Image: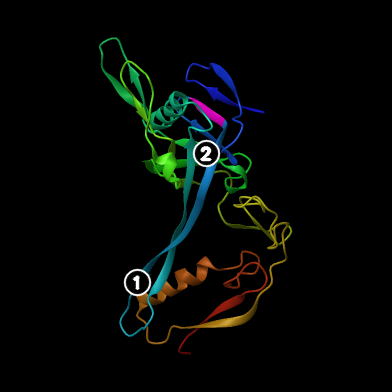
Amino acid sequence: MSWIIRDASGGVTTIPDPADFWNARISLTHVATGASFENLPIMLANVEEQYKPTFKKESVYGRMDPIPTYQNTTRDLTIGFVIHNKSYSHQMSAAILSDLIKMLYPLYSANKAGTGYLAAAPLLRVKLHQYTGDGGVLAVINSFNISKYLDKDAAARTLHTENTPGGAIYPNSYTITMGLSVIHEGGKVGWVYDPNDSTIKFGQGGKYPMGEDSFLATNGAPVVASQPVMLDTRGLTENENMLVENIVDQFSSPASGTPMVDLTGGGATAQVMNED
């Protein structure tokens, strides 16, 4: 087995896998230039994900709860991994790390006058087994932290000094932690209602985001509602009523016009209670 380096000029270098000290593969591509590491063997340390639905909350007089208006759902991904000098030579580990750092910078277009302009931001496409799906994820890099000399084995903390003209000092490993904000791609991100057959499917596919088949209406399920949720609008001003109606509209069934909270079949309708 082997892994591949593609440089910005289209050159390809194939490198044999190290014998040990790796347990996963990661692929990183600098979108602007096409430079990439494909199936780079690493020692995966941790993976953290954070999903954050955001609502704008409007507080109104006399109501205990604010009126929420949905805005978006963001996905952040943190990947921690180790590049061991037990897997690669000290010089090669440092070169890999240096090239990963280069991917954090943008692409400029120069001209003969010596000036130029920013042509493309440093977006990365990252692929890490099932955590990013088959095609990987497009991401903004929020952070890229490097720790050195963190081996738990006390003997491994000894600095290794190569016999080089510059007297370079290399650590035994590099621990890298990348913070990513995922840019959603493809179809609508969320549940999509199909009026042709009254089914609901998830726009990013049933395997989003963990790469495994879902139990929830991935092949489409009839729109069903139960257990009404009463939204008491008595005593609200006209503007406040409009806010509530906006929230109800967000959960409306496109098929029947009946406001709904859960479109997967096990949810509840939302009915407005007026003074009359």
- The magenta span reads 34-38
Q: Amino acid at mark 2?
A: Val
The spot of residue 33 in percent (x, y) is: 46, 24
Mark 1 sits on what residue? Answer: 58
Tell me which residue sits at (57%, 56%) in the image: 190
The spot of residue 6 in percent (x, y) is: 53, 22
Vertical position of residue 177 compared to residue 83: above or below: below
Q: Nearer the viewer, residue 101 or 204?
A: 101
The spot of residue 117 in percent (x, y) is: 31, 23
Q: Amino acid at mark 1?
A: Glu
Q: Is residue 213 left or right of residue 273?
A: right
Q: Is residue 205 left or right of residue 140?
A: right
Q: Name the dominant secondary structure of the magenta segment.
A: strand
Q: Which mark is residue 126?
A: 2
Mark 1 and mark 2 lie on one chain; the one further toward the N terminus is 1
Q: Nearer the viewer, residue 53 or 160?
A: 160
Tell me which residue sits at (45%, 60%) in the image: 52
Residue 103, image quadrant:
top left
